[in-house]
């Protein structure tokens, strides 16, 4: 059965990722009781720009490496050396941009976070090649061990550090320690991969054969970044650190079902599906079976998050975060669509359709950015969340329209029919929300 290798790889990925996410969840529960929303908001304001610089450092190189079949040692080391060089340049640039970040946000002490994040950027860039090697070989348990170890080390360090220094410095340092730990552990684990552990090399020209794929992938990531992070940027700018901290934690909690489902699954999709990339009919059949099951799980997860939001906030975040409950309930409505949609990128990549992924991402950005701007104009977090829910569902339809028309060359209704059960759950959550409001 063609779907068996995919589900086997997904099972291994999920098993490893769940252990990592469990540690991350405990970390969030502990830190949410130590640090206040305004401290989280101050760090989150800079982390938005850190995510953008991460995108620039990675530039689509990871997915491109997963798709290649051969890599000479000189090319391997050259790519590794290039990522380290880019990481150093971007870290320096991030540090120099500190005054601009301060001027943009006009937020107290936001400049204190910048040096910690700049160092994190250097070590993140160094982790790109080793991590791609591990993903290519579906070494999901080793990848999970990297995440678990880094989270335990960084959280323990932060808890100890907060007893000695200002809480803002302690929380900001967590990102640095996490990035350093991930770099060294992932490099060590990559020793046993087919390509081996990389060493810094000077053959930067090794990037040339990968530029075509990387270009479109980077373009998609670039657009996707702004559509997914503009909310944090504008909330921090116009609504302040405390509201940003509340929104960021709400969104992070909402994303846990996505992390537990799609983020655990998607690393397994591209390495498996690329083996069938010459047979779009077969891949479409696998995709349809996979997304149908995923939509049912997503519907259950969304409904549970919607119904149990108050309990989840009390247990995970504590009493000081009770104000985020309505935000979480609204965002939970988008979970079924988000769960399914989050996996489509891996199918585009596996089918070498980075250009189509880029085009779809461009349309997604238009709708998402429009939703965010409307919410900011109203200066109301709940309205912003409702607009995002609408944008996510519009993006769901257009992304799969592109996939079925350009990649599978099959009618879209094959996919949409399978989404009917999850759609009923979504309509029920919307109806209940509107009834309660009225």
Image: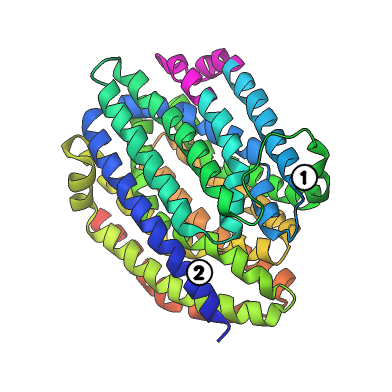
Coordinates of residue 30 in the picture (x, y in percent) = 23, 37
Tell me whether the residue at label 1 lies in contact with that at label 2, contact meaning CB atoms closer than 8 angstroms: no
Badge nearest the viewer, 1 or 2: 1
Residue in the picture at 33% in, 68% down: 300
Q: Residue at x 55, y 35 (%)?
A: 124
Instruction: For the C terminus, give its image quadrant.
Output: bottom left
- Please, what is the dominant secondary structure of the magenta stretch? helix
Span shown in magenta: 96-118
Q: Residue 49 vs residue 311: left or right?
A: right
- Quarter-of-image position of residue 251: top left
Q: Which scheme is used to colour this image of the protein?
A: rainbow
Give x and y (percent) for residue 264: 45, 59
Q: What separation in Å lies between label 1 and label 2 (alpha carbons)?
A: 28 Å
Disc 2 crowd rating (10 Å Cα; few below 14, some 14-19, many 20+) is: many
Residue 339: give its label: none
Q: Is residue 402 left or right of 23 when viewed as pictured?
A: right
Residue drawn 42% across the image and 46% down it: 147
- Could you classify mark 1 by the number of other residues whose Cα lies within 10 Å: few (under 14), some (14-19), or many (20 or more)? some
The magenta stretch spans residue 103 = yes
Of pointers 1 and 2, the one earlier in the residue sequence: 2
Label placed on residue 9? 2
Mark 1 element type: helix
Residue annotated with mark 1 = 75
State whether residue 240 appears in this view: no
Find residue 54 and report its horizontal and vertical position in percent: 58, 36
Query: Residue 34 is drawn in which quadrant?
Result: top left
- Tell me what residue is drawn at x 38 percent, y 63 percent: 15
In magenta stretch: residue 338: no
Q: Is residue 410 above or below residue 394?
A: below
Vertical placement of residue 56 versus 262, above or below = above
Q: Where is residue 104 in the image (x, y as percent from the top left)?
A: 53, 19
Which quadrant is home to the N terminus?
Answer: bottom right
């Amino acid at each position: 059965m063609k779907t068996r290798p995919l589900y086997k790889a997904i099972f291994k990925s999920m098993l490893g990722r769940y252990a990592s996410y469990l540690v991350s969840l405990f970390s969030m529960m502990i830190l949410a009781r130590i640090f206040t929303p305004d401290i989280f908001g101050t760090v989150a304001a800079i982390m938005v720009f850190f995510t953008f610089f991460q995108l620039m450092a990675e530039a689509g190189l990871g997915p491109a490496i997963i798709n290649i079949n051969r890599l000479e040692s000189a090319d391997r080391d050259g790519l590794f050396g290039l990522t380290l060089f880019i990481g150093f340049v971007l870290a320096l640039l991030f540090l120099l941009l500190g005054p601009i970040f301060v001027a943009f946000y006009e937020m107290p002490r936001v400049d204190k976070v910048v040096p910690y994040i700049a160092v994190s950027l250097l070590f993140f860039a160094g982790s790109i090649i080793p991590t791609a090697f591990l993903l290519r070989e579906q070494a999901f348990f080793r990848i999970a061990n990297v995440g678990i170890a880094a989270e335990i080390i960084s959280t323990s360090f932060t808890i100890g550090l907060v007893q000695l220094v200002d809480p803002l410095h302690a929380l900001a340092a967590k990102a640095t320690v996490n990035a350093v730990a991930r770099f060294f552990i992932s490099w060590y684990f990559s020793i046993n991969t087919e390509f081996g552990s990389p060493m810094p090399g000077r053959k930067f020209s090794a990037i040339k054969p990968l530029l075509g794929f990387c270009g479109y992938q980077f373009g998609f990531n670039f657009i996707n970044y702004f559509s997914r992070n503009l909310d944090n940027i504008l909330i921090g700018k116009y609504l302040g650190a405390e509201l940003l901290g509340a929104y960021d934690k709400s969104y992070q909690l909402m994303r846990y079902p996505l992390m537990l489902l799609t983020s655990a699954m998607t690393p397994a999709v591209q390495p498996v599906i690329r083996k069938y990339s010459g047979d779009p009919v077969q891949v479409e059949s696998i995709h349809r079976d996979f997304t149908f099951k995923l939509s049912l799980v997503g519907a259950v997860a969304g409904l549970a998050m919607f119904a149990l939001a108050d309990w989840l906030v009390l247990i995970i975040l504590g009493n000081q975060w009770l104000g985020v409950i309505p935000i979480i309930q609204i965002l939970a409505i988008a979970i079924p669509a988000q769960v399914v949609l989050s996996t489509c990128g891996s199918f585009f990549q596996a089918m070498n359709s980075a250009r189509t992924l880029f085009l779809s991402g461009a349309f997604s950005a238009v709708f998402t950015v429009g939703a965010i701007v409307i919410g900011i104009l109203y200066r109301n977090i709940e309205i912003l969340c409702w607009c995002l829910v609408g944008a996510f569902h519009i993006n769901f339809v257009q992304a799969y329209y592109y996939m079925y028309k350009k990649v599978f060359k099959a009618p879209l209704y094959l996919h949409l029919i399978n989404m009917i059960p999850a759609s009923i759950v979504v309509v029920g959550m919307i109806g209940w929300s509107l009834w309660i409001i009225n």
